[in-house]
Image: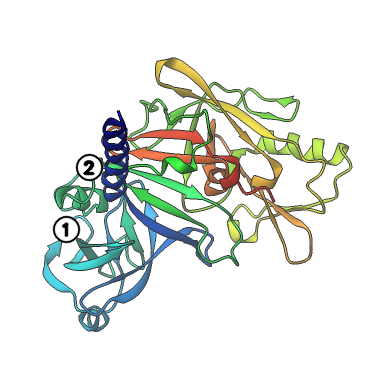
Amino acid sequence: MNKNIYLAIFAILLSCVICQSNTISLPLKISEQNSLIINTKYGDNQCEVNLIPLDDYCSNVITQTDNELKACGVKLIGENKFIGGKQYVAKFQLGDVQADLKFTNPDSQSSFEGEKALCFSKKDSKTQDNVIDELFKQGLIKQKRFYVNVDSIDTTKGVIGSIDIGTPNLSLIKKGSKLVNLKHYDQNDDFSTPSDSSLRYGDLQFIFGSVAGFDLLNPYISIGITQLNAILKQIRNDGVKYEYYDDDANIENYVFNVDSIEKLKDISFNVIADGDKPFKIIIKPQHYTRKLKNGNYQVLIYPQAYTDYIGLGYSVLQAYYLGYDIPSQSYIIAEKAESNVNQF
């Protein structure tokens, strides 16, 4: 009996070790441009670089001068016609793992010129470099999936979360919850999921949102301008002091601040899981606002015109653990454990 117990414990521990070995965890930071970035090192000389994670039309790219790349100790292997530029291979430090990744230095005519990014999208071209495919081919991961955890959107905190490649970190998930597969929105080629037009702000209900998608490049929740104007009216009626300015040409000039979040309401809506079951997403005020140095709060809701799309910035991932299944281009989602949810 005791021997059987020991064997069972050993099997559990061994499975945990195997599970962990199939996960590559990359620390996330927030850039000065407000996007999530992966800080890593590459080349024989381990040059430090910040790379944005892209999940749509993309390829691995690092824009540097030829001399800078040479100094980092990378190997030239040819030209990449998909990107337009010289293609290289180098060792990248990805968490605790080193892996050989191909990337391109975009030339001045390329639409990717100036970018530094790792591509996490589905590979549609033989000349498209994709970190997920490369890791899978090298046997470093067993599944073509990655998961994103954001603990905080405080830009002063340094590391604010992680990208877990391969298998999920189940310790982040709320007890009694599980990862749910969301349906893919068939009319889009990229990552997106259908919604049921159930967007709400507190008791204010809209018939809005037939499709939703997550965005790792900004923290904003994007909704229709009509719906945002209704929310502004409700905020004013609730006696919340606010400042609002929308410069259609430049999001960097956009201003939506409030003096307190106490009277703000939850934002909620349903996305559709496999089996046509609704999965309710609830975004609390502390997760769609960011405290400013002057004591006020930046409200991370942004207007968009002529669309029925709900854009979900990475601020939402303070409360939800989000997975991306590359082959199906569909999301996997779960509520996070309370100990992992940023409350303020």
Where in the figure is residue 86, as x and y percent of width and height? 17, 68
Does residue 95 lie above or below 312 as drawn? below
Percent x, y of residue 114:
36, 68
Q: Can you say whether 268 is above or below 86 in the image?
A: above
Expressed as whole percent of the image width and height from the top left, the position of residue 267 reads 66, 34
In this figure, which residue is indicated by the disc labeled 1?
81
Q: Is residue 24 left or right of residue 283?
A: left
Query: The disc labelled 2 sits on which kind of residue?
Result: Lys
Query: Relative to 191, is 311 on the left or the right?
Result: right
Write down the quadrant of residue 157 in the picture: bottom right
Q: Which residue is mark 2?
A: 142
Could you classify mark 2 by the number of other residues whose Cα lies within 10 Å: few (under 14), some (14-19), or many (20 or more)?
some
Q: Closer to the camera, 74 or 93?
A: 93
Q: Secondary structure at mark 2?
A: loop
Q: Residue at x 21, y 54 (%)?
A: 129
Closest to the camera, between mark 2 and mark 1, is 2
The number of discs equals: 2
Q: Amino acid at mark 1?
A: Lys
Does residue 305 appear left or right of residue 184 in this picture? right
Residue 292 seen in the current view? yes
Name the one closer to the observer, 306 or 202.
Answer: 202
Query: Would you say the residues marked 2 and 1 are in contact, meaning their CB atoms lie under 8 Å apart?
Result: no
Q: Between marks 2 and 1, how big is the CA–CA gap?
A: 29 Å
